[in-house]
Amino acid sequence: MKIIETRHWNAENVRHVCRHEELYMNGTVDEYRSMLNYVRDHLEPTLDDIYHVAEDINRHSEGQTVTNIMYMLSNGVVHRCYDIEE
């Protein structure tokens, strides 16, 4: 038996978390757009993708850690689907 987890996210949900948590307040519009475009280009994120976006958000935010932002993204933005192969 093999269990497969597939993750999905979208830029709108990442944007919502940033707005709700008051993140990315120190970035430019172009930097913010670039981060959201990264999400659009990686709709099935790996842990490295989640880290990449969290690190970007953290660089443009105050009062957070990368791991805390990863937690926010993983629990508030990333949707998981599971498949079991026999």
Image: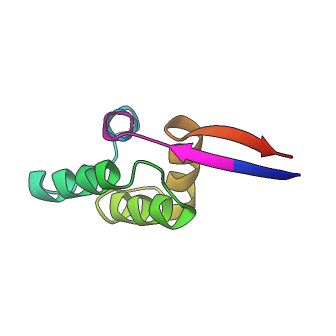
When asked about the image quadrant of residue 54, the answer is bottom left
In the image, residue 30 sits, relative to residue 18, either above or below, namely below
The answer to whether any part of residue 36 appears in the image is yes
Residue 83 or residue 61, whichever sits in front: 83
Residue 3 screen position, x and y as percent: 79, 50
Horizontal arrangement in the rendering, residue 2 relative to residue 5 (left or right): right
Residue 72 or residue 49, whichever sits in front: 49
Magenta includes 36? Answer: no
Residue 65 or residue 71, whichever sits in front: 71
- At a point 43% along the width and 55% down the height, the residue shown is 63
Residue 16 or residue 6, whichever sits in front: 6
- At a point 35% along the width and 57% down the height, the residue shown is 57
In the image, residue 56 sits, relative to residue 29, either above or below, namely below
Residue 80 screen position, x and y as percent: 62, 39
Residue 40 screen position, x and y as percent: 30, 48
Residue 60 screen position, x and y as percent: 28, 60
> How are the colours assigned in the image?
rainbow
In the image, residue 86 sits, relative to residue 50, either above or below, namely above
Horizontal arrangement in the rendering, residue 39 relative to residue 37 (left or right): right
Horizontal arrangement in the rendering, residue 44 relative to residue 23 (left or right): right
- At a point 39% along the width and 59% down the height, the residue shown is 53
- At a point 56% along the width and 62% down the height, the residue shown is 47
Task: Give the magenta range.
Answer: 5-13
